Amino acid sequence: MTMYSLTPEGKKYLKEGFPEMNLLRELKKEKEISKLKKRIENFDIAIMWAKKNGWIKIDKGKLILENFPEKYDLSDALKKVDDGKEVDKNYIEILMKRNLVKEMREDIEKRAMEFVGKEITTLDPSLLKTGLWRKVSFKKYNVTVPGKRLYIGKIHPYQKFIMKVRRKLIELGFKEMTGPLIELEFWNFDALFQPQNHPARDWTDTYSLKNPKYGDLPDRKLVEAVKKSHEENWKYKWSEEKARRLMPRAHDTAISPRYLSKGIEIPGKYFSLVRCFRPDVMDENHLIEFNQLGGFVIGEDMNLRKLLGLLKMFALEFGNAKEVKFYPDYYPFTEPSVQLSIKNNEGKWIELAGAGIFRRELTEPLGIDIPVIAWGIGLDRLAMSALGIKDIRKLFSYDLSWLRDQKVL
């Protein structure tokens, strides 16, 4: 059992009483704070503990007595220490913090002497307090021996990758765009100048919503401008009913016309990092639900060269790509259009993104008359390259052996 003794201040409190109890007794005669300060020694300490114990309150420069305890546990504890009796540990901690009691030196030295001349693995506090740590030997450790492996909690590596991509884009000055998972065909296709008879709008390439089947179109003036662009350039009768159909978003680019039509900063840089859905055959490179990183940059000086440079930066910075290639491609909403492919760590080429400059037939109905470079990157495939994964399905699996081996980034 650890023994304790009173400090000089503790002996004074035992003889004259605790300041907070002295304050309560004085409150029966005087309530003005200015006068009580002259009467009570350690007045600030008395106020602090009396308030902490809920005995007093302060009102307009006066102290109001709320409660007068029949006995004070700390006073009893202090008396027990002086009598050499055992005291509750909680009271001992309070008395020691108030510097009213201390551990007896003899007791500390007695404990420290138990270790003298022995080999120890843990340094006891008593050895430090007495300086007797110099008279013990410490067990040697072989730091080259592998320790026990710990499987600590950590963020999923794919989620960490997404957070890293989002943070870096924001640091580069991009603003994030968001949009609904369930989208109108108007935004997903029509506002992007994709004709209503395009094969990508068939049930084999996009999902549709069964109930509700239709939604409300946006501003009438915008709808009429899009309709005119379709009918004058694609030469067919545009259907408002088809544009009203609801569907799970098929690509991230569906968000871009929403922002372009409602007004944006020019010049400006925008990105979206969203979930998309397409009916596809699942394999090591394809999923029916996937993430895309899309966006656009708008400005008078935007051109294909700047687009290619931006895509290359994304591939090298986010995907750890070894090589980058661009191929001519076709999309209804961009001209010229390119495909971005990267070489992964295994030397395989992976199609990663589609990009291009938005066509005037798309931007003019939205009220934009300057160049807009845009892209849509398969974020899952980008993560595969960055994380060294061969199968895209692993990004969403519960493979504990793989998860445990991933670094805490």
Image: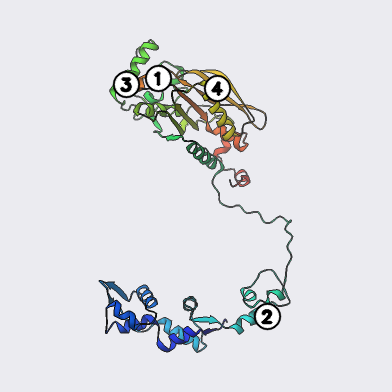
Residue 307: assigned label? none
In three-dimensional space, the C-alpha distance between marks 2 and 4, rounded to whole angstroms, equals: 77 Å
Residues marked 2 and 4 touching at CB (< 8 Å): no
Residue 113: assigned label? 2
Q: Position of residue 190 (x, y in %)?
A: 38, 21
Residues marked 4 and 1 touching at CB (< 8 Å): no
Which amino acid type is marked by label 3?
A: Val
Q: Earlier in the sequence, mark 3 or mark 2?
A: 2
Query: Badge 3 is on which residue?
Result: 223
Query: Badge 1 is on which residue?
Result: 362
Q: Judge whether residue 299 can be spotted in this image.
A: yes
Q: For the residues carrying marks 3 and 2, which lies nearer the camera in this image?
A: 2
Give the camera-side residue of 373 and 233: 373
Which amino acid type is marked by label 2?
A: Met
In three-dimensional space, the C-alpha distance between marks 4 and 1, rounded to whole angstroms, equals: 20 Å
Query: Badge 4 is on which residue?
Result: 339
In three-dimensional space, the C-alpha distance between marks 1 and 3, rounded to whole angstroms, equals: 12 Å
Q: Residues within 10 Å of mark 3 (few under 14, many from 20)?
A: some
Which amino acid type is marked by label 1?
A: Leu
In three-dimensional space, the C-alpha distance between marks 1 and 2, rounded to whole angstroms, equals: 87 Å
Q: Position of residue 230 (x, y in %)?
A: 37, 15
Q: In this image, 384 relative to 57: left or right?
A: right
Q: Residue at x 45, y 83 (%)?
A: 77
Q: Residue 388, relative to residue 123: is it above or below?
A: above
Residues marked 1 and 2 touching at CB (< 8 Å): no
Q: Quadrant of the N terminus?
A: bottom right
Give the camera-side residue of 168 and 218: 168
Q: Secondary structure at mark 4?
A: strand
Q: Residues within 10 Å of mark 2 (few under 14, many from 20)?
A: some
Q: Residues within 10 Å of mark 1 (few under 14, many from 20)?
A: many
